[in-house]
Image (spheres, helix red, strand yellow):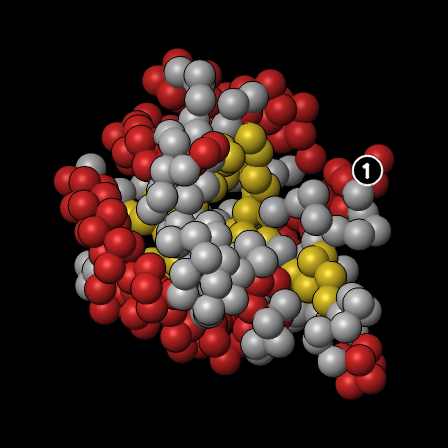
Amino acid sequence: MENKLRIGTLVGGGNADHVIPQIVKHGFESFNLTFWQTTGSTDLVEMAKRIRALADEHDFVVPAVSVFGNPLTGDGGNADTLASWERLIDNAHLFGADIVSGFTGRLTGQSIDESIPKFKEVFGELTRRAADKGVRIAFENCDMGGTWATGDWNIAHNPTAWELMFNAVPEDNIGLEWEPCHQMVSLIDPIPQLRKWADKVFHVHGKDATIAWDIVKEHGVHSKQQFVWHRTPGFGDSNWTDIISILRQNGYKGTIDIEGWHDPVYKGELEMTGQVHALNYLKRCRGGDFVPNPI
């Protein structure tokens, strides 16, 4: 079953043991546990015990544990973000995970180029810590409203930035937590990008986008007219059959975990309706259920 390429979803790490039993029955095969800025008061050892018991009962995996904050500054709500990276790296194995993911952080209000030295300092050390634990580090490719010139949270949203990052920290256990959506909002075609960068894709988030090219052509990208929307897979523009084929052609052994709570239509009371549609859609795109060959 190694080539099954499991399809799952994101759940908050602080209450994952409460949420997973409610939704695993829909057929989710993996759960990416996430924290915002800090792991907070969560006892990771105890949570891991509860999650592993559920995993044994329901046959799912935890491919990654994640913290999304700015570990380069430690300002404000990010005061615990760097320590949370360290805690997750040290405890990922307890969940059965070998990936810790999140934002790179950046020097607030400064350019990506100016953030690279601090990135090298912080993630050079974290990458060594992770290697000692058999853990890989993967960066979400969301711009969080930033550009090349300025922003907060993350520099890993542009392939030119990836080149700078991976040259600064040229280790094998540092890569990307990729999804097509975050490239499409910048009008980047995700398919040729994935072909080029597939060997650095450690984890995939299941999120898509819809681009309104008629609005782009009439109003451009700097007017008040919205021209792109984050979408749940199955409702956006991407061909996920192609995405999964490219991943498999390049030896991808990970999961695709749906990142919900962004779709402008399948939201509110329709949130899980959209996520379960995405789950079944992505299973079809991978070829359906695994069927063993005859002996």
Nearest to the observer: residue 113 or residue 132? 113
Residue at the (35%, 18%) spot, across then down: 45
Residue farthest along the bottom direction in this orientation? 217
Task: Tell me: 144 left or right of 294.
Answer: right
Q: Is residue 279 visible?
A: yes
Q: Position of residue 76 (x, y in %)?
A: 45, 34
Q: Quadrant of residue 163?
A: bottom left
Residue at the (32%, 64%) spot, across then down: 114
Callout 1: few (<14), some (14-19), or many (20+) C-alpha neighbours within 10 Å? Answer: few
Three-letter code, disc 1: Gly
Nearest to the observer: residue 281 or residue 148? 148
From what the image shows, is residue 105 above or below residue 34? Answer: below
From what the image shows, is residue 251 above or below residue 214? Answer: above
Task: Tell me: 230 left or right of 291.
Answer: right
Nearest to the observer: residue 177 or residue 97? 177
Say how many tags the image has.
1
Q: Position of residue 87 (x, y in %)?
A: 30, 29
Q: Quadrant of residue 28?
A: top right
Q: Position of residue 81 (x, y in %)?
A: 38, 35
Q: Is residue 250 visible?
A: no
Quadrant where the C terminus lies? Answer: bottom left
Q: Which residue position holds label 1?
A: 268
Q: Quadrant of residue 53?
A: top left
Secondary structure state at the residue bearing disc 1: helix
Residue at the (50%, 28%) spot, across then down: 13
Residue at the (41%, 61%) spot, across then down: 110
Residue farthest along the front direction in this orientation? 109
Task: Tell me: 41 left or right of 183.
Answer: left
From what the image shows, is residue 104 above or below residue 96? Answer: below
